[in-house]
Image (cartoon, coloured by chain):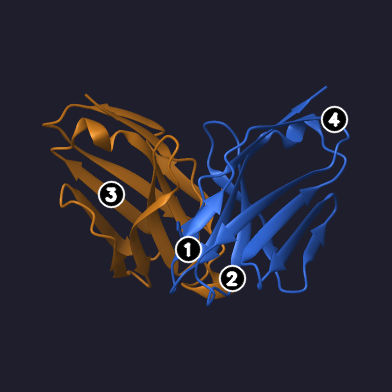
Chain colours: A blue, B orange
Amino acid sequence: RKEVEQDPGPFNVPEGATVAFNCTYSNSASQSFFWYRQDCRKEPKLLMSVYSSGNEDGRFTAQLNRASQYISLLIRDSKLSDSATYLCAVDNTDKLIFGTGTRLQVFP
Amino acid sequence: ETGVTQTPRHLVMGMTNKKSLKCEQHLGHNAMYWYKQSAKKPLELMFVYSLEERVENNSVPSRFSPECPNSSHLFLHLHTLQPEDSALYLCASSQDRGGASEKLFFGSGTQLSVL
């Protein structure tokens, strides 16, 4: 099993739609979780941290499910500008492990 | 000034060349990193420096040689690279190593092509 796994997509959704991505991780001892956004040919940028109690920032909601060992990212009211690759990152023995990313394409 | 600046943005080099990538962070962070990103692969951690001391080297070939002269600057010296080393090389910094402090701020990356 990979340390961190994501569905590569692409997820093609219309503007205004709600879309959710999951990211599974293998180390049950992991404590820190993050979502990053990466635009084509650009660097990853921190989108949000994921806390045990969940985390909401505007249209974005991140949640952690420890029992099933996954984190999720929910995007409501999708905008064209949300089109990007979303990377999850999970700490594993003091080192961040990244997933390969999930590609989101929002169309008009 | 942006938080983490990397130069050059693009680099083409032959297998016998020697070049260096430069990274500078203006965030007052204590940890700096080199990552490699290849197509369809996850980000691979290459080197970590914490307070200018190398704390991790993920079995990277010796043709990659990092240097951290102070907490704001990080270099990656390249020599006798192979075509499979062509990738996007990203520098990052974080307040500290480990846990919730390891929120990474990335530079814009160097797109490296080895001919």
- Badge 4 sits on which subunit? A
- Asked whether the beta carbons under mark 1 and mark 2 sit within 8 Å of each other, the answer is yes
Report, in whole angstroms, how far the alpha carbon at label 1 lies from the one at label 4: 32 Å
Residue B98 location (% of width, % of height):
48, 73
Same chain assignment for discs 2 and 4: yes
Which picture quadrant has residue A56?
A: bottom right
**Disc 2 designates what residue?**
A32
Label 3 SS: strand
Task: Return the residue nearer the eye: B52 or A72.
Answer: A72
Point out the tag, 2 or 4, that comes first from the N-terminus. Answer: 4
Residue A68 appears left or right of A89: right
**Disc 4 designates what residue?**
A15
Q: Is residue A90 above or below residue B19?
A: below
Please tell me whether mark 4 or mark 3 is closer to you in this view: 4
Residue B2 location (% of width, % of height):
56, 47
Could you tell me the amino acid type at mark 1?
Leu
Task: Return the residue nearer the eye: B46 or B51.
Answer: B46
- Asked whether the beta carbons under mark 1 and mark 4 sit within 8 Å of each other, the answer is no
Q: Residue at x 57, y 39 (%)?
A: A8
Label 3 Cα crowd, 10 Å radius (few <14 / some 14-19 / many 20+): many
Residue B41 appears left or right of B84: right
Label 4 SS: loop
Could you tell me the amino acid type at mark 3?
Leu
- Badge 1 sits on which subunit? A
Label 2 Cα crowd, 10 Å radius (few <14 / some 14-19 / many 20+): many
**Disc 1 designates what residue?**
A96
Point out the tag, 1 or 2, that comes first from the N-terminus. Answer: 2
- Badge 3 sits on which subunit? B
Residue B92 appears left or right of A15: left
Which picture quadrant has residue B8?
A: top left
**Disc 3 designates what residue?**
B76
